[in-house]
Image: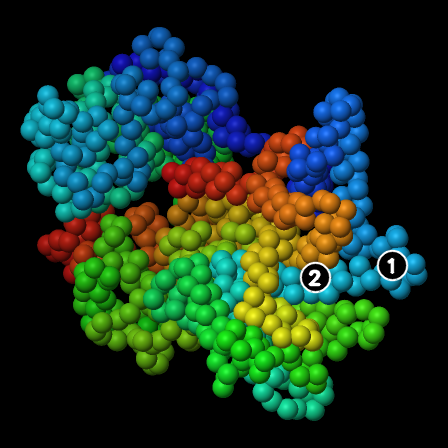
């Protein structure tokens, strides 16, 4: 019994069960939304409808597999493996953004300004990649660094305002999202700033110069590019920073108990500034991915909502580097597999529902426990708080 | 009203907080519940007050079984409770507070304050309390606020009054007055359950003493029992509460505070012209009723509060406006008053907690990285030297008992290179065994030639440790006296009066 409890109290198991639950919710949605099921019910009755329902779900998830991991219908191996490379390509920015948001969480900061931070980094990276001429590789490296620094600056601004005025970072980041995106739109609508030459009146940036593009890892075969390697490096950096370094230790200290940190001589305000900058820097890696991992021009939607998706990745990843890596891969697979599902007539929206449901189950552990009848003694935040309160009462009197 | 508890048991997960507790409180009796912190006294009272539901056991009032699903039920049945931390609304008047939750209303449903005032006056007159029903709570001294709490309970016809550590916030004089009130209430037939861990008070006022230890009733004894015997009943072994120490050999002045003024957020002068010298090799205790500027003084020394006027210097170096980090690096060891809030990170391991103020240097870090091997060795050493009872250094601090948590804080602070050591309430919420150990550590620190300042509201602790005692009242030092001063004179000083014939 205690072994079972041990196993189920680990976050990995809970994450896995949440994913299972998410897919079940998605299956229900597919059954309900399927026209085949409705028709079968009318013509053949209940048994036929159940059969049709199961077939729909099987077909749907099979299409997801074909679209994201291995295409069983391909003629040759290289083509069959393309979906996997697409998953990796799309997972790169999700992983990087997830790391950034997660770093914020661990310092007690809720950074929902990932989109704005990405865009601010992209703004300057676009400048480098479309308005400057530099040798190959160097151009790309400079653009990536500028994307990261730009994002970090936008994040540091949040930390600075929070430290100086006490304003809540949620409000600050939401508002700065608007500012950054509008600023970028204005830049790419102004011909003498960043607008592409053929764009006319619409806001659009040029494609990055070839020298600034993230090089493809398998040129000609797959569009997977260096961005994924950057994401892997980011995972390693995050791990070292948060688990091994003194700075990360101070980040965590402030996140757990700012009072104790202050008493220990840590400047909590300064830590907020650095932590927001670090959080945004990781998001900036995602920005570099978006702006430099393309061969065509883009508009302000280049952020693709990854700043927000990063929140779900961070929550599923449970704060640790490897967890975030896998969470990013999963959601990258969803992005890659969506079109295949659409091809066979399943609404790709089902993946959004699966994604949302997974995070919902993660965020509400008691729900998962109740469904799987797991031992209830494991801790939940609310229960922990209550217990801590009662204990405190007990010890102070 | 007669109160009887039969076989009360309350479990929190695997922890049995109350284990088959039975006791009887006769009408008009002052029944003292004596026990260490964490013995289960408050759990028992929360069961009685309907805040918790018992897993087993029965509550009988005048021999009839009752069941409470919340404090409302308990109040309706005639049980009143005065919590350790008052449940009063500071910006409301006395009358408003007394009727809160049970407001008299007139025909159209508006609050009938006249009746409320009348109630307060009635009860005040009956017990000789001097309470103005229109005074705002925030303007009243703590002792009077406590009386308002008592009036609140009596206004709801409480026949059984529970007082949870009521003397923690009072001066010795106010404590005496409270005891007088308790006797008077008992004479009028109110039963009183008096929760405390202070032996002196038990002996002074109780009719019956029930000792609780580890969630169980150990014994019911008469208050005439020897103090030493009560203490060993409470702790479960022989205790020697005195501290062995040799005469201090005070050296040169190390810490110099001159005309210090500190103003808080509300522009109150929390420290109002304090000057102090602390010499190498002495323990200076700062005594006083809680909230008279002692905490602020400690925080100012550390650098978390800004100094408005005056200077602080440590070994000739001016640290008046130094940051916390600079103060710590200058060699100040600091044990904060509230260890859970300021002294520890509950979700960190013991090893990580040893590192809180050491994350910039050896033995914890090497370059930008944490030096895990050296940290582990250092922390194993501290765990052994400071007798921290734990399965390992990787145990989360929140899983430790209060005493062991405090040893972690003390170990961390004393293990640094120190020029000066200050500890606020070093043994609050700590078991007797750990108190002995911490006191010994403090004296050892003194004997190694480091000046020590102990801030404490526990007079026993002050008398045990101090070589000199500075008494604070309303942000000022009333006087600095030797520990040979009588408790009565001490009490006067804590109320701001310098007694005649006492010289610094």
A5 over B23 or under it: above or below: below
Q: Position of residue B161 (x, y in %)?
A: 27, 25
Q: Residues within 10 Å of mark 1 (few under 14, many from 20)?
A: some
Residue B205 in view of the camera = yes
Comparing B294 with A14, the one in front is A14
Identify the coloring.
rainbow
Q: Position of residue A153 (x, y in %)?
A: 49, 75
Q: Chain of mark 1?
A: A
Comparing A18 with A44, the one in front is A44
Q: Specify the quadrant of the image occupied by residue A294.
A: bottom right
The residue drawn where x is 31% and y is 38% is B84
Q: Secondary structure at mark 2?
A: helix
Q: Position of residue A149 (x, y in %)?
A: 55, 78
Cα–Cα span, label 2 and label 1:
19 Å
Asked if labels 1 and 2 touch by Cβ distance under 8 angstroms, the answer is no
Comparing A81 with B459, the one in front is A81
Q: Is residue A198 left or right of residue A86?
A: left
Q: Is residue A71 left or right of residue A350?
A: right
Q: Which mark is residue A80?
A: 1
The residue drawn where x is 54% and y is 52% is B347
Q: Position of residue B76 (x, y in %)?
A: 28, 18
Q: Residues within 10 Å of mark 2 (few under 14, many from 20)?
A: many
Residue A150 in view of the camera = no
The residue drawn where x is 65% and y is 80% is A208
Q: Secondary structure at mark 1?
A: helix
Q: Which mark is residue A91?
A: 2
The residue drawn where x is 49% and y is 30% is B17
Quarter the N terminus of chain B occupies: top left
């Amino acid at each position: 019994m205690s072994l079972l409890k041990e196993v189920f109290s680990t976050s990995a198991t809970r994450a896995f069960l949440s994913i299972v639950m998410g897919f079940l919710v998605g299956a229900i949605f597919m059954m309900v939304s399927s026209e085949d099921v409705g028709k079968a019910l009318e013509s053949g009755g209940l048994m036929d409808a159940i059969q049709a329902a199961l077939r729909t779900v099987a077909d749907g998830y099979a299409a997801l597999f074909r679209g994201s991991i291995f295409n069983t219908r391909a003629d040759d191996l290289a083509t069959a493996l393309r979906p996997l490379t697409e998953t990796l390509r799309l997972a790169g920015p999700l992983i990087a953004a997830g790391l950034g948001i997660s770093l914020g969480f661990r310092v007690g900061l809720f950074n929902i300004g990932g989109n704005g931070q990405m865009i601010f980094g992209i703004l300057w990276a676009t400048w480098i990649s479309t308005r400057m001429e530099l040798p190959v590789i160097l151009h790309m490296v400079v653009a990536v660094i500028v994307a990261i620094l730009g994002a970090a600056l936008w994040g540091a601004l949040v930390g600075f305002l929070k430290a100086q005025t006490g304003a809540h970072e949620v409000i600050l980041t939401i508002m700065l999202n608007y500012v950054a995106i509008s600023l970028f739109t204005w830049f790419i609508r102004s011909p003498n700033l960043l607008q592409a030459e053929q764009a006319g009146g619409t806001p659009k940036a040029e494609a990055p110069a070839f020298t600034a593009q993230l090089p493809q890892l398998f040129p000609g075969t797959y569009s997977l590019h260096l961005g994924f390697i950057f994401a892997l490096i980011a995972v390693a950096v995050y791990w070292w920073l948060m688990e091994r370094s003194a700075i990360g230790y101070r980040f965590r200290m402030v996140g757990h108990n700012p009072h104790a940190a202050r008493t220990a001589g840590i400047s909590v305000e300064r830590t907020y500034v650095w932590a927001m900058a670090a959080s945004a820097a990781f998001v900036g890696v995602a920005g570099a991915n978006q702006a430099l991992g393309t061969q065509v021009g883009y508009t302000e939607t280049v952020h693709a909502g990854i700043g927000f998706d990063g929140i779900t990745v961070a929550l599923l990843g449970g704060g640790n580097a490897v967890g975030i890596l896998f969470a990013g891969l999963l959601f990258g697979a969803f992005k890659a597999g969506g079109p295949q599902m659409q091809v066979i007539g399943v609404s790709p929206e089902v993946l959004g529902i699966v994604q949302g449901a997974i995070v919902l189950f993660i965020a509400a552990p008691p729900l998962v426990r109740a469904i799987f009848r797991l031992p209830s003694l494991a801790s939940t935040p609310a229960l922990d708080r209550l217990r801590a309160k009662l204990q405190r009462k007990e010890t102070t009197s | 009203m007669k109160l009887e508890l039969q076989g009360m048991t309350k479990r929190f997960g695997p922890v049995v907080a109350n284990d088959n507790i039975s006791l009887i409180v006769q009408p008009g009796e002052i029944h003292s519940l004596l026990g260490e912190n964490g013995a289960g006294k408050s759990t028992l009272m929360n069961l009685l007050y309907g805040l918790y539901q018992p897993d087993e056991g029965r509550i009988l009032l005048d021999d009839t079984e009752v069941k409470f699903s919340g404090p409302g039920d308990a109040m309706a049945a005639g049980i009143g409770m005065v919590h350790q931390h008052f449940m009063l609304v500071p910006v409301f008047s006395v009358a408003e507070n007394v009727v809160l939750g049970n407001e008299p209303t007139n025909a159209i449903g508006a609050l009938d304050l006249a009746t409320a005032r009348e109630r307060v006056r009635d009860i005040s007159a009956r017990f000789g309390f001097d309470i103005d029903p229109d005074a705002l709570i925030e303007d009243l001294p703590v002792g009077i606020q406590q009386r308002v709490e008592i009036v609140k309970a009596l206004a709801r016809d409480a026949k059984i009054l529970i007082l949870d550590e009521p003397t923690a916030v009072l001066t010795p004089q106010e404590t005496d007055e409270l005891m007088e009130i308790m006797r008077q209430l008992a004479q009028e037939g109110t039963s009183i359950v008096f929760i405390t861990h202070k032996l002196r008070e038990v002996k002074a006022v109780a009719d019956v003493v029930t000792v609780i230890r580890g969630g169980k009733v150990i014994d019911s004894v008469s208050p005439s029992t020897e103090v030493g015997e009560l203490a060993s009943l409470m702790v479960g072994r022989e205790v020697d509460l005195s501290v062995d120490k040799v005469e201090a050999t005070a050296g040169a002045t190390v810490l110099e505070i001159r005309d210090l003024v500190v103003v808080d957020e509300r522009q109150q002068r929390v420290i109002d012209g304090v000057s102090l010298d602390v010499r190498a090799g002495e323990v200076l205790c700062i005594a006083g009723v809680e909230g008279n500027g002692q905490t602020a003084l400690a925080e100012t020394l550390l650098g978390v509060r800004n100094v408005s006027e005056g200077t602080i210097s440590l070994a000739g170096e001016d640290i008046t406006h130094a940051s916390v980090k600079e103060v710590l690096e200058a060699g100040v060891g600091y044990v904060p008053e509230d260890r859970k809030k300021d002294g520890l990170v509950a979700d960190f391991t013991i090893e990580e907690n040893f590192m809180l103020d050491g994350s910039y240097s050896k033995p914890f870090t090497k370059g930008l990285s944490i030096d895990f091997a050296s940290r582990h060795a250092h922390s194993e050493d501290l765990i052994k030297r400071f007798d921290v009872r734990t399965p390992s250094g990787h145990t989360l601090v929140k899983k430790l008992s209060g005493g062991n948590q405090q040893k972690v804080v003390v170990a961390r602070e004393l293990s640094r290179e120190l020029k000066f050591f200050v500890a606020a309430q070093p043994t609050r919420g700590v078991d007797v065994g750990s108190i002995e150990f911490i006191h010994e550590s403090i004296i050892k620190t003194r004997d190694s030639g480091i000046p020590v300042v102990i801030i404490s509201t526990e007079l026993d602790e002050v008398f045990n440790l101090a070589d000199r005692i500075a008494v604070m009242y309303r942000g000022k030092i009333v006087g600095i006296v030797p520990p040979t001063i009588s408790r009565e004179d001490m009490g006067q000083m804590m109320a701001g009066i310098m007694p005649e014939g006492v010289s610094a």
